[in-house]
Amino acid sequence: MADLTFNTKENQTVDRHLLLLYLNTGTDNGNPVWSPVGKRVGDSSMNYDWSEETTTDILGDTHTSMSKPVITQSFDPMELTAGDKAQLKIWNAAIRDQDPNALANMDMLVVHLYAGTADTAAFAERYTSCAVKPSSLGGAGGGKLGMPIDVTYGGTRTIGTATVKAGAVTFTPEA
């Protein structure tokens, strides 16, 4: 696969809203229904822990090794919003059912709308077993009810492309 490029004009920065996370809110992983995660969240970043290890050998040379990254992301505050299918799926698994197995096996899709080539869809990564962990439920009196979550990306990583048209997301795995 050829290197991808950023789909912005020369010297233009990439807008944050072009990096999106989706949760499969359907009942069949073969026919996923992708719903956006993080509505009303003002700031969220994917954090990469490469487990870097640096050693110095007996000759005084320094060497660094790294492992595949453990990727985590926090969404806080995440105010509960009627009609948000991703929040509802997480709330049902966490608050209603207290089902750790369901929370540790969420099917998620990261869509990099800013990256690709001019003649193809955006770069995307699908993770089959992400852990989605609500860290609290509540908020200040007179305020909004929040359910901040922490996501750890896991399971099989499949790369490919995604198209987003009229709110519908289609993921096509790389051949």
Image: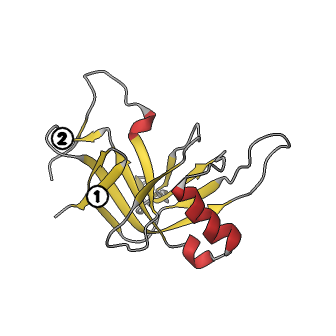
Residue type marked 2: Thr
Up-down relation of residue 168 to residue 117 (above or below): below
Q: Secondary structure at mark 2?
A: loop
Q: Residue at x 37, y 30 (%)?
A: 14
Q: Secondary structure at mark 1?
A: strand
Category of crowding for the residue at label 2, using alpha-carbon neighbours closer than 10 angstroms: few (below 14), some (14–19), many (at least 20): some
Q: Tell us which disc is closer to us: 1 or 2.
A: 1
Q: Residue at x 46, y 57 (%)?
A: 50
Residue 91, percent from left and from top: 64, 63
Q: Which comes before the other along the chain, label 1 or label 2?
A: 2
Q: Is residue 81 left or right of residue 155?
A: right
Residue denoted by label 1 = 171
Task: Please state, as top left, top right, bottom left or bottom right, where the C terminus lies in the image.
Answer: bottom left
The residue at the far top in this view is 11
Q: Is residue 67 left or right of residue 161?
A: right
The image's mark for residue 159 is none
Disc 1/disc 2 C-alpha distance (Å): 16 Å
Residue 61, percent from left and from top: 40, 52
The image's mark for residue 117 is 2
Q: In this view of the protein, can residue 65 be seen by the observer?
A: no
